[in-house]
Image (cartoon, rainbow, N blue to C red):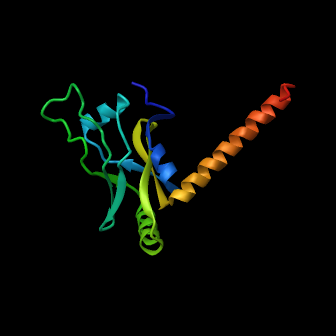
Amino acid sequence: MAREQGQKMIAQNKKARHDYAIEDTYEAGLVLQGTEVKSLRMGRASLVDGFVDLDRGEAWLHGVHIPEYSQGTWTNHSARRKRKLLLHREEIDKIERRVNEKGLTVVPLSLYFKDGRAKVEIALARGKKSWDKRQSIAERTAKREVEVEVGRRLKGMRD
């Protein structure tokens, strides 16, 4: 059987990009049980309530919902168990230093398969205030309006 190539997206955490200002991102592997992998291959997962906890030099992913595999038996996993993240020691130490000194948090952004292996993209993030969210929405709306107007002008349409 040929190995998988490329990247297959499973889940994204769009709410994290709205609620947090992303400062730095990392790619981490996941320690999974067999039925979790099968459930992920079916494209079922949710990152909405997920967060990363750093404990005694290890990174743990909490709150990520991977539903039970429908054809699983007594070997099925629990849906919201904590899962170990596979990162290099230097990366874990760097993340831990920044979280402790700057008041950042670590959130999962996306879950995907890369060359047949489950990966999660995590980010060091700072929480946005409500006015920050409104400002980013206003900037996105203004940018979209400019693109629409440029498109209309290129097509020769006038107001």
Q: Is residue 102 left or right of residue 141?
A: left
Q: Residue at x 40, y 39 (%)?
A: 117
- Given residues 66 and 21, the one toward you in this image is 21
Q: Residue 20, relative to residue 48: is it above or below?
A: below
- Given residues 42 and 138, the one toward you in this image is 138
Q: Residue at x 18, y 35 (%)?
A: 76
Q: Position of residue 113 (x, y in %)?
A: 43, 37
Residue ranking furthest to the bottom? 101
Q: Position of residue 86 (x, y in %)?
A: 37, 53
- Given residues 15 and 149, the one toward you in this image is 149
Q: Position of residue 98 (x, y in %)?
A: 47, 70
Q: Position of residue 82 (x, y in %)?
A: 26, 51
Q: Residue at x 74, y 37 (%)?
A: 147
> Where does the C terminus fall, quadrant-wise?
top right
Q: Residue 93, relative to residue 120: is it above or below?
A: below
Q: Is residue 10 visible?
A: yes
> Where does the N terminus fall, quadrant-wise?
top left
Residue ranking furthest to the front? 159
- Given residues 18 and 96, the one toward you in this image is 18
Q: Residue 101, relative to residue 144: is it above or below?
A: below
Q: Is residue 22 visible?
A: no
Q: How many marks?
A: 0
